[in-house]
Amino acid sequence: MISGSTILFYLLAALTLTCGLLSVTTRHIFRAAIYVLFALIGIAGLYFWMEYEFIAAVQIVVYVGGIIVLIIFSIFLTQQAGEKLAKPVLNRQLFSALAVFCGFALTLLQVFQHDFKAGTEAAVLPTVANIGNNMLNVSESGYALPFEVISILLLAALVGCIVIALRSKPETK
Amino acid sequence: MMEPGLYHILFISAALFFIGVYGFFTRRNLITMLMSTELILNSVNLNFIAFNKYLWPGKMDGLFFTVFVIAIAAAEAAVGIAIIINLYRSHQSIDVASAEDLKY
C-alpha cells in the first residue's frame, strides 16, 4: 500500500532531478534557465513535503522570484535570439561524466554505509514564531550575530553591484 | 517502494550536487555556470534541512544555515551577474575563454 505522501515525494524527486539534468545538458540557454526554475520549484516542494513551510516560501520568493528572474534578464541582455550554446568538447564531456560518476558513487557508498543516529530531544516545530524568536535571540541557540553578519554582507553586495554596474564616465569633461 | 526518509533525501541531494558539478565542468558560458552553482547550493540546503528534520529535530541550526545560504546565494548571484554584464560590455562575449585578461 503506497500512501499519497510517498507518491508525492517520488514525483517531486523526479521533477527535481530530471529538470536539473536537462538544465545542464540542453543547448538552449533560455531553456536551461527555465529547467533550473522547475528544479528549484521541485526543491521547494520537497521542503513543503518535509513540513518546513517557511523555508519553502523563502525558496520560492528568493530563488524563483529573484535569482531566476535576474538570470533570465541577464540572458536577454547578453544573448542573441535563437543562438545555441557551443557543443562541449567530447573529451571534456566524457571525463567530467566519469569524474562526476565516481564522486557520486563514492558519496553514496559513504552515506549508505553510515548509520545516522537521531537525536532524542523533543522536536521544536519550525513555525514562524519559533524561527523569529531564535533568529533575534542573543542568548544560547540564538542567531543574532550571523543575522547581523549577513546584513552587512548584503549591504556590501548591494554597494558592490552598484559600483560594478556603474558606467565609467566619459573622459571629456 | 519504500517509505521515503533521510536516505532518500540524501540521495536526491547528492545527485543534484553532482549534476551541478557536471554542468560546471562542461559549460563554458558564464551564465550557465552560475546556474550550476545555484543547483549545487540548493542541494546543500536540502541536506541541511533533511539533517535538521530527521536527526536533530530539537534544534533549528540546519534551518538557519539554509536561510543564510539562501541569502549568500542571492548576494553572489547579484554580484556575479553584474560582473558578467560588465564583461559582456567590454568583450561582447560571456565565454570563460574571453575572461582571461587577468592572467597576464
Image: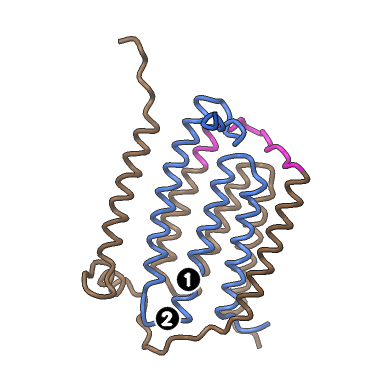
Chain colours: A brown, B blue
Quadrant for the N terminus of chain B, please: bottom right
Residue B50 % position (x, y): 49, 74
Residue A150 % position (x, y): 32, 55
Q: Nearer the viewer, residue B102 or A39?
A: B102
Quarter of the image for residue A171 reads top left
Q: Nearer the viewer, residue A162 or A140?
A: A140
Quarter of the image for residue B63 reads bottom left
Residue B52 % position (x, y): 44, 76
- Residue A83 lies in the magenta stretch: yes
Which residue sits at x=37%, y=82%? B58
Q: Secondary structure at mark 2?
A: loop
Number of the label disc, if any, that sits on residue B56: 2
Above or below for A35 versus A71 = below
Secondary structure that dominates the magenta span? loop
Residue B67 % position (x, y): 39, 62
Q: Is any part of residue B92 visible from this angle?
A: yes
Q: Amino acid at mark 1?
A: Phe
Q: Nearer the viewer, residue A89 or A3?
A: A89
Question: What chain does mark 2 sit on?
Answer: B
Tag 2 and tag 1, C-beta contact below 8 Å? no
Could you classify mark 1 by the number of other residues whose Cα lies within 10 Å: few (under 14), some (14-19), or many (20 or more)? some
Range drawn in magenta:
A72-89
B34 horizontally vs B79: left or right: right
In the rendered image, which residue does mark 1 sit on?
A48
